[in-house]
Image (spheres, coloured by chain):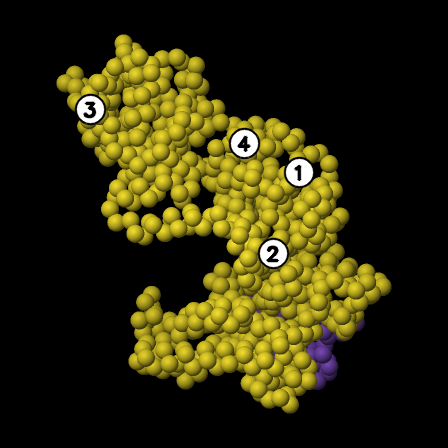
Chain colours: A yellow, B purple
Amino acid sequence: MSNPELTWLPHQPDWNECLRRVTALDKASAWSALVELANVRLDMMATTKLDRQLLKLFKQCPVNLETKPVRLAVLGSSTVDHLHAGIRVGTLRRNIWVSLYQGNYGQYVQDIHDDGSDLHAWAPNTVLFAFDARHLLAGYQVGESSEASEVRVAAAIDHIVGLWRSARSKFGCDIIQQTILPIHPRLFGENENRLPGSPAALVARLNEQLRKCALDEGATLLALDHWAAEDGLTAWHDPAMWHRAKQEVHLAAMPMYGDIVGRILAAQQGKSRKCMVLDLDNTLWGGVIGDDGIDGIVLGQGNALGEAFSEFQRYAKDLSRRGVILAVCSKNDEKNALLPFEQHPEMILRRDDIACFSANWGDKATAIRAIARQLNIGLDAIVFADDNPFERNIVRRELPMVAVPELPEDPAFYTATIARAGYFEGIAMTAEDAMRTQQYKANIERESERHSATDLPSYLKSLDMTLHWSRFTHSDQARVVQLINKTNQFNLTTRRYSTDEVDKLLENPAALPLQMRLVDKFGDNGIISIIIGYLKDKTIDLDTWLMSCRVLGRQVEHAVLGIVVNEARRMGANRLIGHFRPTEKNSMVAEHYLRLGFTALPDGSGINQQFELHLDAYQALPTFFVITEN
Amino acid sequence: MTEADVLLKLEEIFRDLFDLPDLQLDVSMSADDIDEWDSVNHVMLVVQVEREFKIKFHTAEVEEMKNVGDLVKLVVGKLGKSTPR
């Protein structure tokens, strides 16, 4: 069991020493020094130490702070004071000063409803309700009727919503509601929800209802149940700690808990980050475009590393669709930097996804300043993602207000690291966000048709499939060679080609080497089918016909045959010959040519069955593709 | 690890946790001798000791812990039992 960590923040070896030195600084410098010390991967002890210094130096909000001070009351049904240090530091991390209400254990009802309570005198501007699961479920009865369960859930929700309304009318404050931590063991199992009165099922129901009511009532959620799912419940909750100190959230999870509170408080002030600035080489693709060239960089389908980069691009693209601005900051010749955006078939990010494209040989801090100016946003609105520790450190040093996530070495974890940091925390979709998203709305509607698709043709039709075909290209050669050499099932002859042999095909005027890329409304499947034929005596002899099994059942082969027939005619052929060489793995295509309307030739043998199709007898088979030549 | 080694390491933790850089930890010391050693800090102390030594206390053991000497004995006992990493 390991407790939740601030994985996106860097370690700092001389942190303790820097913390000691803070006391010698003047007030204004001390605050910024503390903010920088908070932007380090702190554990429970370091958080406690930093909080101690913060409390000593800043009992009052520092003057001239551009953020609004927060007066936060964390009201819980069990111990919550152990989270205070984490909350203060998580808020400090975002350059916000927070004062926390010191309540009495479990007295939240009196605090809110009693007009003479200490809380009324203290006057919070934000209230965070943190109810433990045992408290909310008190009196549950396993095996009660499902109606009784519903009543129980409704009563708990009424209670909570009543508190929100009272707090808001009395203090005019913002409301944050922690979702319920799913601490209860299951009694029924995988189908727990079928057991009326099950505490685990009740918690799930409560969280569902909290989400709905929070939206209606304008409360903001702190989704603790998400974090239990992300890190594992044991990272967040330790029953021994509950029995010992009534701490439902693990003390060692306090830095992460506080960071989550900090990001919500910052978001409420409009201080979430707005823009992600991306490096290119080894951040958006593997390799160096200037050295490796368009054919040499690693990106996209068919290669694990390439797919990891694709997924990171997909995440960036999704962020842009919810309103995060994307920019590029790369040390490159601009012409080289643009090349993949313009020419690489596997790029998910396109040039028009990038609001500001900076590729030059100057230092990155200067470039990022220029990007901020051009986009008219503050440096504190920027996240800078770069695989290179050198560039990260220089930007951290020069521009401490820019957030620079500590990207892990493996690009497969870029996305998780940035997502965990919560840089772009949202409260409500603004009208502006919605506008940006509008153009994609039509796509979303089209996707929902998948559910209404009942029979195969209408399903295939609803996929909006496009088949992009071309003769072999240099930029796709690696993928082509890989497909030829690893495809075993949908492969008529299992004939392997080396890179050299594929190269020779490009020069051979009698060769017909075709590659097919399938794009549908869910995305790009990459190159999925290869045909290699040779022209001899007005006949195209189909030496290779293979397809990736990922796209089986879409009638790709019907469309491919159409393309082959057209190309064969163009080359002056009037006949196709196909071969089937049975192996242990390719029986699925034994009938392939017959299904396509070829006839078996008597001169074929068992190990090399042959089929022919006269082009003037060819009749187009139904397909659901838009076919494009690249 | 001997009792003396453990005590030395505990001294570091106590100094850090209670912000007492000059504290001389003694096996006879208890919460009565250190003002900062309140119930809230006690919970953190236990968690931090568990993390530092990579051990886990039994719920009953935490209840019975009365002074630094008890804590030292507990840690040494746990370390003896654990398999070497």
Amino acid of disc 1: Ser
The residue furthest top is A537
A245 and A55: which one is in front?
A55
A191 to A152, vertically: above or below: above
> How far is disc 3 from disc 2 in space, using C-alphas?
59 Å
- Residue at screen point 33% across, 16% down: A570
Secondary structure of the residue carrying numbered label 3: loop
Q: Chain of mark 1?
A: A
Residue contact between numbered discs 2 and 4, judged by CB atoms under 8 Å: no
Provide the residue designation for mark 2: A423
Q: Are marks 3 and 1 on the same chain?
A: yes
Mark 1 Cα shell of 10 Å, populated few (<14), some (14-19), many (≥20): many
Q: Quadrant of the C terminus of chain A?
A: top left
- Residue at screen point 43% across, 69% down: A208
Q: Quadrant of residue A504?
A: top left
Q: On residue A342, which mark appears?
A: 4
A187 and A93: which one is in front?
A93
Provide the residue designation for mark 3: A598
- Residue at screen point 31% across, 71% down: A194
Amino acid of disc 4: Glu
Amino acid of disc 3: Phe
Residue contact between numbered discs 3 and 2, judged by CB atoms under 8 Å: no
Residue A307 % position (x, y): 47, 40
Q: Earlier in the sequence, mark 4 or mark 1?
A: 4
Provide the residue designation for mark 1: A358
- Residue at screen point 58% across, 78% down: A168
Q: Chain of mark 2?
A: A
> How far is disc 1 from disc 2 in space, using C-alphas?
22 Å
Whether residue A13 sits left or right of residue A517 in the image: it is right
Secondary structure of the residue carrying numbered label 1: strand
> How far is disc 3 from disc 4 in space, using C-alphas?
40 Å
